[in-house]
Image (cartoon, grey):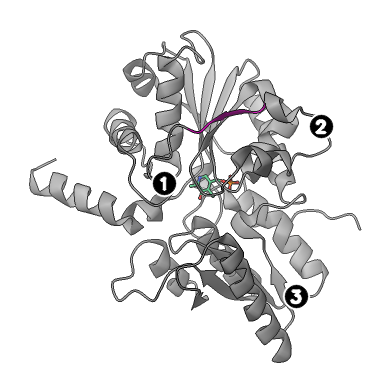
């Protein structure tokens, strides 16, 4: 079956010069550009929209009436699946790691706004989360529904095409791009970019969402033959764990806010910028080399992150 993507509001996103940030991290004028994929689609926006345009097309093609997906409590992917479901008139069930929270924040508030049902899976690992999602699918089927499972992080061989297209768009906008820096979560975004831009130009910053980021990305690559070992992946920005605040990522969040008025967050985009800072420091990215930081979104995650919220409150109390 040949599939074409739905229109969930993905657009040709702008690429903006970020000279003040460029200078602050040791690059030159015009070296650093930001691709604003945080501006994509409904639901507050973000990279998952480009992938959902493919997975939701698959869901509709098989006659689904309910989208089911899973993730962390503050999953941006879950939030955007909820928004996509609302737009398409599909029911959405989110299977999230953790427990009900009386003080829900960030993405969880938007999940509720979009009318998604949340099923809490407790303190589970990835296989446990998958098992909880399978139970939900079975329950829905027994109730007569036709559920469709959107994979973890929305990354599947078909949805990776959304980012292969984004890579082609970027190559048109910035033909001399030398480095494309992107947060690596479930891996589909990086895999798509590599499929059109080539492994040598894409630098993925592992955020700790999967145990083996190289296998995750390699397993999602499209037609283009890429040696697994040639994938450029930094694993030095995770810190203690996916959900914890890593100091370099927090410094990157502040730096982007204070040089460009850009909102990053500590889980993905803050780590991506921190990875770029580290790459400049160790000479992997050099002055004079055109570099694009992909802003993948995630703004609600800033307000859903307990420690980030605490630090922002402290800044606010001290007058900035
Ligand atoms: C999910 C996500 C990523 C990572 O994308 P993957 O395709 O899962 O690797 C990056 N940034 C943000 C803000 C995200 O929500």
Give left or right: position of 107 versus 214.
Answer: left
* Numbered range of the magenta stretch: 231-235
Residue closer to the observer: 234 or 101: 234
Dominant SS in magenta? strand
- Label 1 to label 2: alpha-carbon separation: 29 Å
- Label 2 to label 3: alpha-carbon separation: 31 Å
Task: Check if residue 192 falls in the magenta segment.
Answer: no
Q: How crowded is mark 3: few (under 14 residues within 10 Å), some or many (20 or more)?
A: some
Residue at image position (30%, 76%) is: 102
Asked whether mark 1 lies closer than 8 Å to ligand 1, one says yes
**Residue identifier under label 3:** 64
Q: Residue 267 carries which label?
A: 1
Q: Measured from the top left, where is residue 80 in percent x and y?
A: 54, 60
Task: Determine contact: label 2, label 3, CB under 8 Å.
Answer: no
**Residue identifier under label 2:** 224
Q: Residues within 10 Å of mark 1 (few under 14, many from 20)?
A: many
Looking at the rendering, in which quadrant would you find the N terminus?
A: bottom right
């Amino acid at each position: 079956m040949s599939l074409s993507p739905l229109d969930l509001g993905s657009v040709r996103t702008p690429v903006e010069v970020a000279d003040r940030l460029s200078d602050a991290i040791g690059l030159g004028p015009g070296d650093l550009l930001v691709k604003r994929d945080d501006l994509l689609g409904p639901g507050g926006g973000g990279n998952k929209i480009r992938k959902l345009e493919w997975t939701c097309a698959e869901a509709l093609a098989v006659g689904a009436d309910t989208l089911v997906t899973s993730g962390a409590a503050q999953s941006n992917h879950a939030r955007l699946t909820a928004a996509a479901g609302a737009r398409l008139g599909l029911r959405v069930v989110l299977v999230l790691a953790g427990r009900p929270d009386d003080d829900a924040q960030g993405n969880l508030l938007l999940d509720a706004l979009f009318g998604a049902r949340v099923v809490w899976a407790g303190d589970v690992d990835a296989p446990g989360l998958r098992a909880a999602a399978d139970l939900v699918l079975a329950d829905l089927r027994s109730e007569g529904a036709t559920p469709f499972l959107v994979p973890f992080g929305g990354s599947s061989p078909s949805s990776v095409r959304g980012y292969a297209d984004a890579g082609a768009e970027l190559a048109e906008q910035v033909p001399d791009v030398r480095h494309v820096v992107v947060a690596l979560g479930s891996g589909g975004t990086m895999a798509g970019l590599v499929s059109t831009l080539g492994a040598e130009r894409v630098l993925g910053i592992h955020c700790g969402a999967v145990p083996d980021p190289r296998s995750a990305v390699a397993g999602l690559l499209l037609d283009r033959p890429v040696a697994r070992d040639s994938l450029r992946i930094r694993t030095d920005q995770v810190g203690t764990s996916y959900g914890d605040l890593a100091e370099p990522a927090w410094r990157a969040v502040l730096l982007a806010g204070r040089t460009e008025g850009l909102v990053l967050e500590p889980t993905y985009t803050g780590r991506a910028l921190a990875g770029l800072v580290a790459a400049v420091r160790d000479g992997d990215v050099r002055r004079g080399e055109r570099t694009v930081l992909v802003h993948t979104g995630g703004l609600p995650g800033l307000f859903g992150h307990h420690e980030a919220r605490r630090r922002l409150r402290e800044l606010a109390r001290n007058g900035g």
